[in-house]
Amino acid sequence: MPKKEKKRVIILLYISRKFQKNTYYTEKEVNEILKDVFEDFVMIRRYLIDYKFLNRNKEGTKYRVVNI
């Protein structure tokens, strides 16, 4: 993952497009999608949430892509 934020955001935007809009995913489903993209899928999942590409419900059980 690039250290420069601008490049990181571009990569995260690209990764976020692997998810369908208006679809809820379990953490396991998110991990499966991200495993194909990057070895450290947990880090990518955190970045996607931190940069608001993915939303997580309060319980942390469901994820969905933010409409961009």
Image (tube, grey):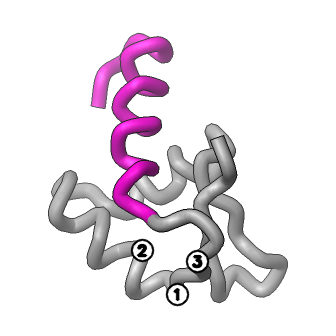
Label number found at residue 26: 1
Label number found at residue 23: 3
Q: Is residue 36 above or below residue 30?
A: above
Number of the front mark, 3 or 2: 3
Residue that appears at 40% across and 87% down: 28
Tag count? 3
Residue that appears at 35% across and 31% down: 11
- Left or right of residue 57, residue 9 in this image: left
Where the C terminus falls, by quadrant?
A: top right
CB under 8 Å between callouts 1 and 3?
no
Residue 27: image x %, image y %? 49, 82
Neighbour class for label 2 at 10 Å: few (<14), some, many (≥20)? many
Residue 50: image x %, image y %? 64, 45
Label number found at residue 37: none
Q: Is residue 51 above or below residue 29?
A: above
Label number found at residue 30: 2
Q: Is residue 49 above or below residue 11?
A: below
Which quadrant would residue 60 be assigned to in this image? bottom right
Residues at marks 1 and 3, CA–CA distance in whole angstroms: 10 Å
Viewer-proximal residue among 9 and 44? 9
- Asked which secondary structure carries label 3, the reply is loop
Question: What is the three-letter code of the residue carrying label 1?
Answer: Thr
Residue that appears at 41% across and 12% down: 4
* Magenta region: 1-19
- Asked which secondary structure carries label 1, the reply is strand
Neighbour class for label 3 at 10 Å: few (<14), some, many (≥20)? few
Question: What is the three-letter code of the residue carrying label 3?
Answer: Thr
Which quadrant would residue 36 be assigned to in this image? bottom left
